[in-house]
Image: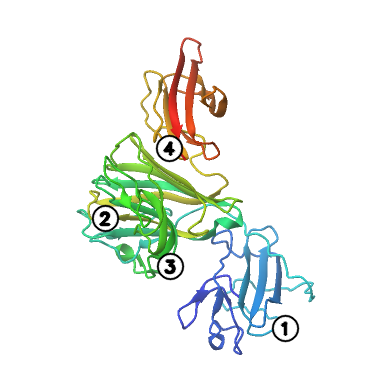
């Protein structure tokens, strides 16, 4: 076992290997090969000097498969390396344990204390510690340069692609985040900024963004030629933010939309299932040049669903895709990617502050304040969009001065069925996403009541919304 990736002659990489009647310190051990690629945690953790708890157990599953468990954990959880893997049973008999140390090791002494051998239940491998990080592995994906070059950045979390003119073929850039399994308990959250320079994604379906589990391989090349040498095939979720009044893309289930699953195959194709046809806001807003904030999350629920959400927004443009997916495309994710078709007007894309973290709730959560810095001059409640809807819709409102605001959903009998806002808010424009997934189809009303902090202004407005399941 090793706490760093190593290769073996057949090209595979791993951190734990099979010993197949060969030298136990060799990563080629008579063709045994790796059986795990689990990495140390927190990400890029250093095996510092100190005391570590370690254990290994092997349990036969059947005549040909063993379950191997191991852990090497610093007592203060500053370093973790462990795993539980079912793999080929090269043997069912064991008579010794060995520790090997390479000549580049910094330690001058290693003491093994209270080493005990026992039989019974397999060991318990503790959960790996987590620490948020900025994406530091970037490259062109699928060899799709499209006449552009990769644009490396000295700051971790930043990268880009571009040229002096629009791309001449599909171009795609991808960041590797290490494999993250949302079924392990924590949800995945990725945030960052995307700057479209010299133009935007005004044309039909010209921008595609994905969160997926892709066979990216490893980085090859340097500088503006940096790329991934693996396949662009993967599974996950694909987002195609809409611009203007453009028609939406057609997916494999013969439905038009701008959000769906990635079928096994190239990630940027709409060969998966359409999950949503959610238009941007305001209606027919254009995705032009500028700096956009983006967020994407996947939270695995006890029901087996994946709650998937993606937002892309800047003043004057907001795109929100969200769905509770009953048949998840995947529970594992290792990369995010941005791609441009040849009809995009942008001349380069710069990604900054791209950060990977965990979350327990889908985004956006509750109310999102607009990034438009201008202050509204009057109270306003907009019509929800889309309407009719199923099961989510978005409500926007404006507050010209600090006010106590309540926003409530009522049924046809005048009974309050949901309270979306009940708090004091400063002057701004606000967006609320309402999820009626647990409500029955029908006509509902939403009402805003706002009273200024100084008591001089009162505002009430009511609008109708229709839930159609």
Q: Residues within 10 Å of mark 2 (few under 14, many from 20)?
A: many
In the drawing, what numbered circle is on residue 389?
4
Q: Residues within 10 Å of mark 4 (few under 14, many from 20)?
A: some
Q: Is residue 338 above or below residue 63?
A: above
Query: Which sits earlier in the primary sequence, circle 4 or circle 2?
Result: 2
Q: Which residue is mark 1?
A: 96
Q: Position of residue 315 (x, y in %)?
A: 35, 35
347 on left or right of 318: left
The one nearer the camera, 76 or 116, is 116
Q: Please identify, in this view, whether the residue under mark 3 or under mark 1 is nearer the observer.
A: 3
Secondary element type, mark 2: loop
Q: Please identify, in this view, whether the residue under mark 4 or under mark 2 is nearer the observer.
A: 4
Query: Which sits earlier in the primary sequence, circle 4 or circle 1?
Result: 1
Q: Which residue is mark 3?
A: 215
Query: Which sits earlier in the primary sequence, circle 2 or circle 1?
Result: 1
329 on left or right of 159: right
């Amino acid at each position: 076992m090793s706490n760093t990736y190593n290769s073996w002659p057949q090209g595979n990489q791993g951190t734990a290997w099979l010993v197949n009647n060969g030298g136990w310190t060799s990563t080629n051990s008579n063709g045994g090969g790796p059986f795990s690629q689990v990495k140390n945690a927190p990400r890029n953790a250093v095996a510092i000097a100190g005391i570590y708890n370690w254990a290994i157990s092997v349990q036969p599953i059947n005549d040909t498969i063993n379950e191997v468990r191991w852990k090497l954990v610093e007592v203060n959880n500053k370093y973790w390396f462990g795993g539980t893997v079912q793999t080929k049973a090269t043997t069912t008999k064991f008579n010794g344990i060995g520790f090997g140390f390479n000549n580049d090791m910094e330690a001058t002494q290693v003491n093994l204390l209270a080493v005990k051998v026992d039989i019974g239940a397999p060991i318990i491998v503790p959960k790996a510690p987590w620490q948020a990080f900025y994406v530091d592995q970037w490259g062109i994906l699928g060899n799709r340069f499209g006449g552009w070059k990769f644009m490396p950045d000295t700051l971790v979390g930043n990268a880009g692609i571009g040229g002096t003119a629009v791309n001449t073929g599909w171009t795609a850039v991808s960041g590797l985040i290490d494999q993250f399994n949302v079924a392990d308990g924590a949800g995945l959250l990725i945030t960052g900024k995307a700057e479209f320079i010299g133009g935007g994604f005004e044309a039909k379906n010209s921008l595609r963004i994905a969160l997926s589990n892709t066979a990216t391989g490893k980085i090859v090349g340097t500088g503006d030629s940096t790329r991934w040498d693996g396949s662009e095939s993967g599974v996950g979720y694909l987002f195609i933010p809409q611009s203007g009044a453009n028609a939406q893309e057609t997916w494999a289930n013969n439905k038009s939309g701008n959000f769906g699953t990635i079928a096994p195959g190239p990630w940027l194709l709409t060969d998966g299932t359409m999950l949503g046809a959610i238009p941007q806001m305001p209606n027919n807003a254009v995705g032009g040049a500028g700096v956009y904030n983006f967020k994407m999350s996947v939270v695995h629920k006890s029901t087996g669903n994946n709650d998937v959400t993606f937002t892309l927004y800047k003043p004057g443009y907001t795109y929100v895709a969200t769905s509770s997916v009953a048949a998840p495309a995947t529970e594992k994710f290792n990369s995010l990617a941005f791609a441009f078709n040849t009809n995009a007007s942008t001349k380069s894309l710069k990604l900054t502050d791209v950060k990977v973290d965990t979350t327990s709730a889908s985004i956006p959560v509750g109310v999102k304040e607009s990034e438009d810095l201008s202050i509204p001059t009057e109270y306003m409640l907009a019509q929800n969009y889309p309407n009719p809807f199923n099961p989510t819709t978005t409500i926007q409102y404006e507050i010209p001065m600090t006010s106590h605001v309540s926003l409530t959903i009522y049924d046809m009998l005048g009974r309050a069925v949901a309270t979306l806002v009940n708090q004091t808010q400063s002057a701004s424009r606000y967006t609320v996403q309402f999820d009626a997934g647990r409500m029955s189809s029908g006509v509902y009303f939403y009402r805003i009541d706002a009273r200024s902090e100084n008591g001089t202004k009162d505002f009430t407005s009511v609008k109708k919304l229709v839930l159609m399941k």
